[in-house]
Image (cartoon, coloured by chain):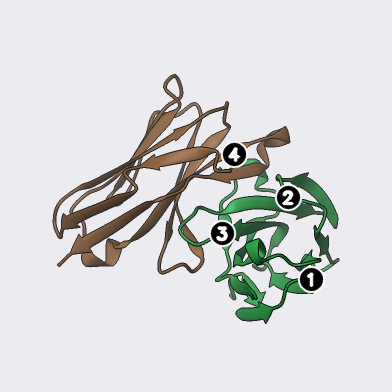
């Protein structure tokens, strides 16, 4: 059983560009959350998707948007990239029906570098 | 900004010793979870403790929760070099407790 997968592994962009990161949750998982982790810091919650809708959002500007597809996979889009967007982007999924006590399973992350 | 804080920020011990990490948070929670992260990659879930629980064990791990002090501790007994990693606590808050807030982490180095 494959775990949470993310693509690409690494990405280099320049300021002002747009980027799309992808996440496939574990089998049987229907909730996907995205996090941004700057170097030396803990992950910061960006948003959570469930039933193809954004259910919760952290303190991130509208440049950060997402989508969840019928197969539960998800995308994170970031527009007008800034140098400060350089970080490790993590995706986490949770088992269907587990509610807010469910364990989050994290993917390996996408390392985004903005030059 | 981080919503919780772990201390110490860094901890270096010898193999076989115990390691204790602390986490403090600011608002009401539904549950608190501890995670491990190796070399800046994905996080691995270690243990979850509910807000109505005071202590929980899993193998060499012991977690305590004091909701009156808004703090938790993670104890790793008989540490091994393989325990070298960053450890984070995360609290579930927000509407329906679906927002997870991580602390800034404790970097543990276990020397062989």
User: Are circles 2 and 1 on residues that touch, CB within 8 Å?
Assistant: no
Observer-nearest of A18 and B43: A18
What chain does badge 3 belong to? A
A79 displayed left or right of B72: right
Q: Is residue A43 above or below residue A91?
A: above
* Same chain? Circles 1 and 4: no
On the image, numbered disc 2 is attached to which residue? Answer: A60
CA gap, disc 3 and disc 2 = 13 Å
Mark 3 or 2 closer to N-term? 3
On the image, numbered disc 3 is attached to which residue? Answer: A37
What colour has chain B?
A: brown
CA gap, disc 1 and disc 3 = 20 Å
Q: Secondary structure at mark 3?
A: strand
Task: Locate residue A50, reporting x and y percent.
Answer: 79, 53
Q: Secondary structure at mark 4?
A: strand
Residue A19 sits in quarter: bottom right
What colour has chain A?
A: green
On the image, numbered disc 4 is attached to which residue? Answer: B92
Task: Report the disc number at residue A16.
Answer: 1
């Amino acid at each position: 059983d494959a775990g949470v997968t993310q693509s690409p592994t690494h990405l280099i962009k320049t300021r002002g560009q747009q980027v799309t990161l992808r996440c496939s949750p574990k089998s049987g998982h229907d909730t996907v959350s995205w996090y941004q982790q700057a170097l030396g810091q803990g992950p910061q919650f960006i948003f959570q998707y469930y039933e193809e809708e954004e259910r919760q959002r952290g303190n991130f500007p509208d440049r950060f948007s997402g989508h969840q597809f019928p197969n539960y996979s998800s995308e994170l889009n970031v527009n007008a990239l800034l140098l400060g967007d350089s970080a490790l982007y993590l995706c986490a999924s949770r088992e269907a029906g587990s509610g807010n006590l469910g364990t989050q399973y994290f993917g390996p992350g996408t390392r985004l570098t903005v030059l | 900004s981080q919503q919780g804080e772990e201390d110490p920020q860094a901890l270096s011990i010898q193999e076989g010793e115990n390691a204790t990490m602390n986490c403090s948070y600011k608002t009401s929670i539904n549950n608190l979870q501890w995670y491990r992260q190796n070399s800046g990659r994905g996080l691995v879930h270690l243990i979850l403790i509910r807000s109505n629980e005071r202590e929980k064990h899993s193998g060499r791990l012991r977690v305590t929760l004091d909701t009156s002090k808004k703090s938790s501790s993670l104890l790793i007994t008989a540490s091994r070099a393989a325990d070298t990693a960053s450890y984070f606590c995360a609290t579930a808050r927000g509407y329906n407790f679906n927002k997870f807030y991580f602390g800034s982490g404790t970097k543990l180095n276990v020397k062989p």
